[in-house]
Amino acid sequence: MSGTRLILAIVAAALMAAPVAVSANTLTGTMNARMRVDTSCRITTEPLFFGNVNIFSGVVDATANIRLRCGPAVAYSVAIDNGQNPNGTQRRLWNGGGWFQYVNYQIYRNAARTQVWGSTAGNVVTGTTPANGQVTLVAYGRVPNSIVMPNEYRDVVTVTVTF
C-alpha cells in the first residue's frame, strides 16, 4: 500500500471506530422594530354665524368651534388672518356693494372678548395636544354696536395651524 493510501485507510478506520459528535450550531441576527407616530394635524371649523339681526340690534356676539386632531403631545399654534375685507387690522363683513357696504367685526381668543385672535406673535393660540390628540378651541366673535342696513354681510378668514 502506498503511503497516501495507508494514511487514508487509517483516517477512515478512525472515523468509523470513533463516535461522531454532532454539535448544534446557533446563529443570531438582529431585526429592527420601528413605529412612527403621525404628528400631522387635521382641522375642522364651524361658521361664525352672527344670526339674523335687525338694524338696531346693537352688539352681537357669536361663537364657533375650531377642532384639532393631532398625535399626542404635539405643540401647536393657531392663527386667524384678517379675512378678505380688512381695513388695516379691522375685520369687516361685506355686503357686495352699495350703501353701508361693510360691518366691522372682530374674533377673540377669550370669552371676555378682550384678546384679539390674529396671525401675529402674541395674538395666536398655542398649546400642546393631550394624550388623545384632540383639542377644541372657541373663536369668540363680536359685531360692535352699530347701525347696519338690511342685507347679508359675509367674510372668509383663513385659520392656520402650525405644528
Image (cartoon, grey):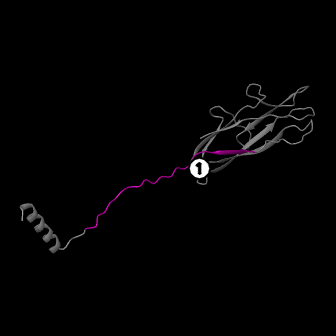
Q: Quadrant of residue 148?
A: top right
Nearer to the camera, 90 or 93: 93
Give amino acid for label 1. Gly
Q: Is residue 64 magenta?
A: no
Q: Which residue is mark 1?
A: 71
Residue 64 point in image, percent of width and height: 76, 44
Q: Quadrant of residue 21?
A: bottom left
The residue depicted at 58 percent of the width and 54 percent of the height is 131
Label 1: state its secondary structure: loop
Residue 69 point in image, percent of width and height: 64, 49
Q: Is residue 42 left or right of residue 23?
A: right
The residue depicted at 31 percent of the width and 63 percent of the height is 26
Q: Is residue 87 above or below residue 6?
A: above
Q: Is residue 35 above or below residue 120?
A: below
Q: Is residue 34 above or below residue 162?
A: below
Query: Residue placed farthest to the front in the image?
Result: 1
Residue 35 point in image, percent of width and height: 50, 52
Nearer to the camera, 98 or 123: 98
Which stretch did the figure color magenta?
Answer: 23-45
Q: Residues within 10 Å of mark 1 (few under 14, many from 20)?
A: many
Q: Is residue 23 left or right of residue 16?
A: right
Where's the C terminus, which quadrant?
top right
Nearer to the camera, 140 or 42: 42
Residue 23 point in image, percent of width and height: 25, 68
The residue depicted at 34 percent of the width and 59 percent of the height is 28
Task: Give the main secondary structure of the magenta stretch.
Answer: loop
Q: Quadrant of residue 58?
A: top right
Where's the N terminus, which quadrant?
bottom left
Q: Is residue 40 left or right of residue 136?
A: left
